[in-house]
């Protein structure tokens, strides 16, 4: 609906105002909005960003009429995860993860289902569940505590020093989230307005050239100082697959997660079988790294001697024949050759025996040569990823 009579307004509301708009159903979700998918950790990050008055993307809402009451409401076109997180933080409640058979499942069309049945799953929950409980915080909490106690758990957001972020009345009234408010032509009919809003929603979520996950993640390297050279070292960028450089954070995150899981390979990337979801694991590692705090995380790695270990890894790659500036034929080859080496140095902090390298190298090449067709066709499947990492770690055991 290209129409010069469509209007767009900009502003900001306090958290208190946003919460009241949601609870009184002045803001509604269109049927094509996805479910709430953020984790408690993502919710906590948002509230800490709000607390520090950091930049936040605007929430996009559109003026429309409720089909039942015929009252004017705002349709939420973009920002559901943010507003829902604010609402849940205010309530101090978070929906419990549902059992697998109660959740909406989908399998990555590229990878196929993993052998352990760990499909990516989304809980069928939105803030509409809370809107039906009452139009005030007190009413909602009373309803949750009396009728839905088994469906929600306590949500407590803590700072790094273990103090609790308190969302009291002052906080809610002095912290803000910006908005973009779209008002379609008042002369347009309901169907025409609906088409307009669906086009807006589609444009927000699909148009433009999106950042790759690595490009998006790179912005996080500057939290807590410039960590880019630590997480994206130059000597790793010359190790490539089809001219694409090694993703060093991927190795650190997966291997530190493996260590946290008791060095049991089936615990590595558990719950992240779909490749798209693993970026969340990598980002969590970067956040923990920037805070230099892995105590309450999915990872185990000593960062106090990180620089020394990184320098040692560089010298190892330079010294071990065939590794420096390696042009790998596939991610399979790269994982076999480097994951075990990175694990023993960066995670375990060990030193290698150069004399054992040729034996290890031969064993690794033999493993690569024996990779089956199924593995080659779907190297991102979690079972194959785990197989490569476990084998590489075991092969490198000989020289550490």
Image (cartoon, rainbow, N blue to C red):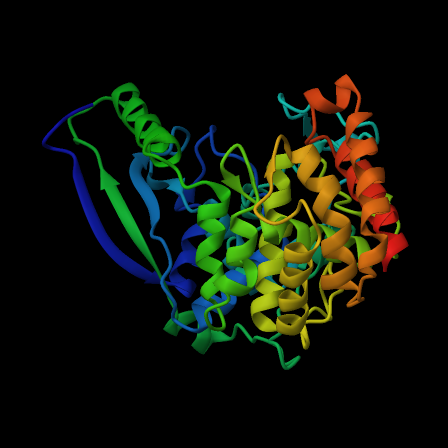
Total numbered labels placed on residues in the image: 0
Q: Is residue 50 above or below residue 66?
A: below
Q: Examine the rendering and report whether any part of residue 99 can be seen.
A: no
Residue drawn where x is 72% and y is 43% of the image: 337
Measured as percent of width and height from the top left, residue 54 is found at 39, 67
Q: Is residue 16 left or right of residue 257?
A: left
Question: Is residue 289 at least partly visible in the picture?
Answer: yes
**Closer to the camera in the image, 102 or 325:** 325
Left or right side of 159 for 86: left
Q: Judge left or right: residue 242 versus residue 148.
A: left
Q: Residue at x 83, y 61 (%)?
A: 353
* Image position, residue 73 (x, y; %): 34, 41
Vertical placement of residue 184 versus 132, above or below: above
The image quarter containing residue 71 is top left
Q: Is residue 4 above or below residue 233?
A: above
Q: Residue at x 36, y 29 (%)?
A: 202
Quarter holding residue 101: top right
Percent across and percent down for residue 238 are 52, 48
Front residue of 261 and 332? 332
Q: Quadrant of the C terminus?
A: bottom right
Q: Give the answer, above or below, for where 47 lies relative to 27.
A: below
Q: Nearer the viewer, residue 220 or 56?
A: 220
User: Residue 388 appears at what percent x and percent y?
Assistant: 78, 38
- Examine the image and state in which quarter residue 78 appears: top left
The residue positioned farthest toward the left in the image shown: 4
* Quarter containing the N terminus: top left
Q: Residue at x 60, y 76 (%)?
A: 159
């Amino acid at each position: 609906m290209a129409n010069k009579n469509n209007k767009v307004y900009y502003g900001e509301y306090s958290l208190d105002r946003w919460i009241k708009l949601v609870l009184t159903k002045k803001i509604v979700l269109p049927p094509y909005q996805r479910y709430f998918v953020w984790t408690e950790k993502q919710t906590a990050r948002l509230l800490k960003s709000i607390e520090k008055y950091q930049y936040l993307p605007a929430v996009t809402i559109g003026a429309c009429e409720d089909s039942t009451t015929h009252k004017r409401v705002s349709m939420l076109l973009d920002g559901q995860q943010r507003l829902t997180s604010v609402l849940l933080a205010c309530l101090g409640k978070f929906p419990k993860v549902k059992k697998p058979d109660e959740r909406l499942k989908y399998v990555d069309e590229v990878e196929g289902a993993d052998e352990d049945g760990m499909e990516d799953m989304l809980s069928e929950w939105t803030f509409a569940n809370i809107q039906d409980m009452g139009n005030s915080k007190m009413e909602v909490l009373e309803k949750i505590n009396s009728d839905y106690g088994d469906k929600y758990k306590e949500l407590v957001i803590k700072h790094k020093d273990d103090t609790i972020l308190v969302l009291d009345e002052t906080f809610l009234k002095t912290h803000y989230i910006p908005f973009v408010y779209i008002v379609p032509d008042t002369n347009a009919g309901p169907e025409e307005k609906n088409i307009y809003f669906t086009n807006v929603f589609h444009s927000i979520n699909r148009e433009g050239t999106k950042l790759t996950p690595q490009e998006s993640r790179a912005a996080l390297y500057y939290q807590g100082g410039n960590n880019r050279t630590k997480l994206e070292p130059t000597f790793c960028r010359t190790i490539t697959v089809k001219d694409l450089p090694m993703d060093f954070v991927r190795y650190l995150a997966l291997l530190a997660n493996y260590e946290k899981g008791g060095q049991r390979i089936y615990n590595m990337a558990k719950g992240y079988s779909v490749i798209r979801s693993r970026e969340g694991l990598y980002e969590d590692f970067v956040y923990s790294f920037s805070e230099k705090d892995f105590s309450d995380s999915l990872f185990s790695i000593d960062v106090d001697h990180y620089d020394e270990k990184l320098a040692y890894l560089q010298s190892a790659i330079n010294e071990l024949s065939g590794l420096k500036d390696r042009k790998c034929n596939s991610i399979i080859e790269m994982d076999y050759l480097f994951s075990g080496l990175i694990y023993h140095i960066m995670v375990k902090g060990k030193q290698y025996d150069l004399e054992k390298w040729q034996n290890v190298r031969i064993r690794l090449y033999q493993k690569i040569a024996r990779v089956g067709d199924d593995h080659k066709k779907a190297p991102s499947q979690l079972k194959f990823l785990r197989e490569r990492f476990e084998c590489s770690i075991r092969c490198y055991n000989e020289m550490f």
